[in-house]
Amino acid sequence: MESQTTTESPPDAWRVEVHRRPERDEPEGKGALEVLRELGIESVGEVRAGRGYLLPSTLAAGTVESIAAELLADPVVDEARIAEPLAALPRGERRRIVVLPRPGVMDPVAHTVERLLARTGRPLDPEGPGVASYRVYELAGSPTEEELHTAATRVFANETVEVVRVDRDDLPYGTGLGESPRGRVEIQLLDAGDARLEEISRDGVLSLSLEEMRAIRSHFKELGREPSACELETLAQTWSEHCKHKTLTGIVDYREGDKPVERIDNLLKETIARATRELDRPWCVSVFEDNAGIVAFDKGWDVCIKVETHNHPSAIDPYGGAGTGIGGVIRDVLGAGLGAKPIANTDCFFVGPLDLPRDAVPKGTLHPRRILRGVVAGVRDYGNRMGIPTVNGGVWFDESYVGNPLVYAGTVGLLPHTSAHKEVRPGDAIVAVGGRTGRDGIHGATFSSAELHEESEDVSGSAVQIGDPITEKRVLDCLLQARDRGLYRGITDCGAGGFSSAVGEMGEKCGAEVDVDKVPLKYHGLASHEIWISEAQERMVLAVPPEHVDECLAVFAAEDVEATVIGSFTDTRRLVVKDGGEVIGELSMEFLHDGLPRVARQAVWEAPELPDPGCPAADDVGAIVSSLLAMPNVQSKEWIVRQYDHEVQGRSVAKPFVGVRADGPGDAAVLKPLADSMRGLAISCGTNPAYGLLDPYAMAAAAIDEALRNAVAVGADPGSAAILDNFSWGNCEKPDRLGALVRAAKACFDAAVAYGTPFVSGKDSLNNEYRVGDRTIAVAPTLLITCMSQVPRVDRVVTMDAKRAGNRLFLVGATRPELGGSHYLQHLGLAGGRVPTPDLQQAPSILRALHSEIAAGRVASCHDLSEGGLAVAAAEMAFAGDLGVALDLGAVRCEEPESGYDADATRIFSESCTRFLVEVAPEHAEAFAHGFGDLPCTAVGTVLDEPFLRVRGTGGATLCTVPLEELRLAFTGGFHG
Amino acid sequence: MSDVRALCLRTAGINCDEETVRAFELAGARTDLLHLNVLVDAPQRLGDYRVLVVPGGFSYGDDVAAGRVFGVELREHLAAEIRAFVESGGFVLGICNGFQVVLELGLFEPDAPARERSIALAANASNRFEARWVTLRAEDSACPWLTAGELLPCPVAHAEGRLVVRDDAALQRLIDRRQIVLRYAGAAPDRPAGYPANPNGSAADVAGLCDPSGRVVGLMPHPERNLTPWNHPLWTRLPSREVGEGVGFFRRIVDAAAGRLDALSSTSNT
């Protein structure tokens, strides 16, 4: 926060502030007040939020008055306050906190107001300063200066992207961003020694290793010239871990315990991609080659899916980071094949404990509550505005995410099968569509490839951006029209690396020439190479045949979307970048894409040496079940889900929350993508970082099992399932981190092949460590498996809420004494133990058998057993259905526990994989049980018409009788944002 | 398919257009989807239609206020044409963002200049975007195509849907002119619905309004998201149905626009 000065001069702009009339309720301020209270600020009595607008001083007073009264303020609920240029606003008794976007940061509201003025006959001078918008908070009471500072920086503003002013009128307006010279800039590399090479990489945030810098130096030595800034930046973007996955595709020497060292040449190819290759499913239309994995659906349509992480930007600016994360993955789907219509989003977050004491928050990081609120708001505002239902997701909590939260965003798209493939031909125009290019998002790709540290929020602020979803929605609207009219034949999104990566990838096989002078800019002052690598959001690049250029541009122009020819694809196999007449960069595609030296790394896996704590007996089973339901990983995330529009597009069949009071956590979302087809699409996920700390192999296999069993539980055919792997790991230059990754990747191969489930896409984020001083904290090994599967008929979809008293409950799947990483042991504060691992021989048969029963219509409700085990699943089914449940542990078959395992507690709290609690009407019970043959399937309980969860122990005694309301309250209590 | 033609109007940020077109097509109207720019360039095209629908979404990001910019654009460029359309017997439906747009356009208070508008849709009392299913109850109103007392389940999904009135007189005027067409229904019909049955804190539990003629209707909830038998949140607990409850809603307005209202009201009472 800028310190108080006496020389404050108000902006040379009209100021219009819109406030709720004093007698009107103002909900935003009320919400903010609650957050202040949470921070221990009691001295503020009321907060009222308002909106401010800065308008050019050249406007006449009457015009400003009419703009305020007719356009900006609502005549019923608002009042407008107007200040003349250079005049201060009259100050009342309240303290004022004003928050503006930093110069250069996206201000979509200002753009909308400019458009509004133009469309109402009040166009602004295009050369003059335009509109700026700000937020204002007025605080009643007597906060101290320190409290105001805390409020300003921790609640109202994020200084990485925003400027904040307390009781001051000197708002920046029309501030230039500084001029960088255009043209070719030479970098002295040929004579640079190793130290200088490292310095160039570090100072330029290039994230290139010494070896890579040397490879670049020798390449240019051969050419006999120095590289330009444009060339060096292009290489840094294209060679970044973010873009090239150097670790996963490199050479790894892997050592596990005393076993001989195993050399793995390209881990990705040898595990994940190999599973897909060996399975060779005919319905895999396009996998691991496009922006998203594409599989066949029905009636001539395909579906595609992509999941990305946006961890580092979200750590620094949760709102902007998560918003642009979802914006980016949506563009991946827009750029899949010839473009798909996004029909669903899925979002998973991993953050620190919400009750983390404030003094335990490391310097330079935000409190987990603020991070979670911010990422939820970011996803909400982007996804909802795009009109894409957010149907699936989850939140997991662990200390290791405090400095480095994980934000996964995924999008599912629908596209005609005939649009599943793309091409680029020499002579095609390179057309940029969508948002303008600015200095935002410089070095996102290289920044995300480095570890975070205390100063990250200062030095990397330019890597963080605010999204503009409506611009992306406009692009979507026009793009699908242009696709269906066949006006382009190649497309990709402008993501990490901006044009340099997009054009470099599209033109890899032929060549490309771009003139950055043709690129529409948000403002003056960008250096040539900044235009080339800017990651400004909401842009796509098309390859347009010359004969369609005019028509294609017209499709976009008709809906006020900018589309510009910025160059053409060539047959030179060279990437040529010009600025006007001057060549600022020229690289051979061969060196750009294949000149990267391969990485060779050491990997070691050693199992943690922890004694097996067994499974202690529970004194009060009922109290523990309630406690487990109230654990943050298990507890209801309804406060998040209700903020996401999960119904838009009208395709929703199974919702995130189901049951009589819509409070039961569904296992997977189901959509009905096509009006003329009964086929459903299920989206589910699986992850368990607590297992990862003990055994990454078990964790990965269990995550795949969980994603699949969630899908099967709602009625999906496991034979149709396609999965995605998203790894978020610590620094894999460290052998133990990489060893854990190798072990997880091996499990991915084994499990995918066993289940017959191909990977269709994936992504890794390998530098999730937070450095404080000389200490680094790595995130728990976190593999998120996302599953997209198909339900043969949506009318056979099953939800998890218990349906009718008198129905039988079957436990499907084998219970074993597997409690390592379980929520029961976490609750008891015990580490170690046997990590749940699916039986890869038996599990696929269990999934198939259960699917047959659901498809035959014999299942009334079904819930998978996961965090917390049997009793938690039973409790959720019970309160969701407003019906009681009786369980008899004596009927639960379990491998005879070793000593130290209590028979009852093991049966109730084991988290063994591939298990379901299935409700079956008495008339179907026999056929249902018969359907499982020799597979484990046992009647263990019944649905009751009394409102209790009743558990009888193996000894025959009743262990607990818990009222449904108690269970429901445990589940729905806790943090609500 | 009937002879009724419906125009679904979209612009930047409108995002419920596809399912809204589907709803009108299912209800028997030939439905065209047009971008605002097209209609502004050729306003006479409005005359080709009997129903104008403004669907949900986030027009222009809901920047400044939800529906404000789209509403102002219509007021600025098409006010006379839309007024003439309504006066000549045309039907207008605004859903969610479309409701906010039509309210901004001024159709619910045709006599009041924009600055004197007395009703508004403001931020939800919860200060949250709320996506959840609610039950609507049709009121006895000037709207000829809704049957009083009927219940309609459908989802809401909005952040600014709280009906606010300038004063008690403004609310009384809505009642007197029989402009309240839909209310959020709670557990008991004679008591306020309460949160979350009334998801936004709307005055008098109002979910939808009509203009004094009854032919312009706006509502915050989304009946177009309940067209199939599998959209309802409790469908796995319900007996099987042929269509979602939302289809009837659209059939009524299309039938009304086709002049088949009498036949309709006699069947709907059975």
Image (cartoon, rainbow, N blue to C red):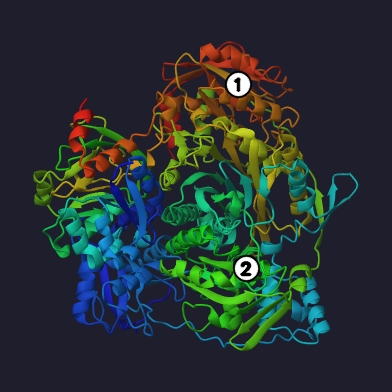
Question: Could you say which is closer to the camera, residue B264 or residue A591?
Answer: B264
User: Does residue A507 sit above or below B45 in this rendering?
Assistant: below
Q: Position of residue B171 (x, y in %)?
A: 13, 48
On the picture, is A743 further left or further right than A688? right
Please tell me in which quadrant of the rendered image residue A431 appears.
Answer: bottom right
Please tell me in which quadrant of the rendered image residue A492 appears.
Answer: bottom right
Q: Is residue A141 visible?
A: no
Dot 2 corresponds to which residue?
A502
SS assignment at label 1: strand
The chain carrying label 1 is A
Which-is-in-front pick, marks 1 and 2? 2
**Spatial separation of the CA atoms under disc 1 and disc 2:** 51 Å
Q: Is residue B82 visible?
A: yes
Question: Could you say which is closer to the camera, residue B269 or residue A432?
Answer: B269
Dot 1 corresponds to which residue?
A811
The first of marks 1 and 2 along the sequence is: 2
